[in-house]
Image (cartoon, grey):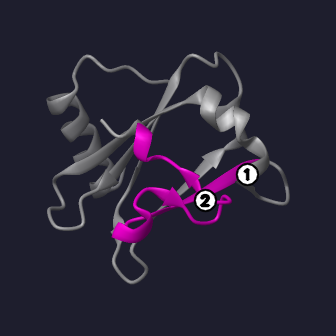
């Protein structure tokens, strides 16, 4: 398990111990392009629409802190046509912007916005 993932899981346990998710994804911050990268299996879109997926985005100024985005599975399902689904159909990619002008906008997924899901 990567250092970023370990930091993220510890941060989540400390700050939101009551939260439960089907899936938890974490990403370090990529300074060269002001972005967080996520690759998710398409199976994340299966199952109960009422459940959430947790995305933990490493704080660019303080590596042990994270931005916490709790995305309802229903939002991803409803916007499936906007997702950057790989050609083989098995995975989709999210490139979430860290730029202030388009904070938490997904640049490769027709500008899906995740700001409203930040905790």
**Residue drawn at the location 63% of the way across and 57% of the way down:** 93
Query: Of all residues shown, which one is farthest toward the right?
Result: 88
| Secondary structure of the residue carrying numbered label 2 | loop
x, y percent for residue 59: 24, 59
Between the residue at mark 2 and the residue at mark 1, the CA separation in whole angstroms equals: 8 Å
Q: Residues within 10 Å of mark 2 (few under 14, many from 20)?
A: some
Dot 1: what SS? Answer: helix
Residue 94 vertical position relative to residue 101 in the rendered view, above or below: above
Q: Name the residue at 43% across, 80% down.
A: 33
Contact (Cβ within 8 Å) of mark 2 with mark 1: yes
**Residue 62 placement (x, y as % from top left):** 14, 62
The C terminus lies in quadrant: top left
**Image position of 91 (left or right of 14):** right
Magenta segment: does it hold 21?
A: no
Residue found at x 33% / y 49%: 5
Give residue 81's position: percent from left, percent from top: 79, 47
Residue that label 2 marks: 111
Mark positioned earlier in the residue sequence (2 or 1): 1
Residue 96, above or below 6 = below
Residue that badge 1 annotates: 82
Looking at the rendering, which quadrant does residue 70 occupy? top left
Residue 13 visible? yes
- The residue at the far bottom in this view is 32
Question: Magenta includes 103?
Answer: yes
Q: Is residue 53 left or right of residue 74?
A: left
Q: Nearer the viewer, residue 21 or 116?
A: 116
Q: Which is more toward the observer, 68 or 115?
A: 115
Report the side of 10 relative to 48 (left or right): left
Residue 57 location in percent, x, y?
34, 53
Q: Residue furthest front?
A: 101
Residue numbers of the magenta segment: 90-116
Let me know if residue 25 appears in the view.
no
């Amino acid at each position: 398990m990567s250092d970023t993932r370990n930091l993220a899981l510890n941060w989540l346990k400390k700050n939101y111990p009551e939260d439960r998710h089907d899936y938890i994804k974490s990403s370090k911050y990529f300074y060269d392009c002001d972005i967080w990268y996520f690759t998710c299996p398409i199976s994340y879109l299966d199952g109960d629409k009422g459940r959430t997926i947790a995305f933990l985005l490493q704080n660019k100024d303080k590596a042990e802190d994270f931005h916490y985005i709790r995305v309802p599975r229903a939002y991803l399902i409803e916007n499936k046509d906007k997702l950057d689904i790989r050609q083989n159909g098995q995975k989709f990619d999210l490139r979430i912007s860290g730029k202030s002008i388009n904070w938490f906008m997904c640049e490769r997924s027709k500008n899906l916005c995740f700001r409203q899901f930040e905790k």
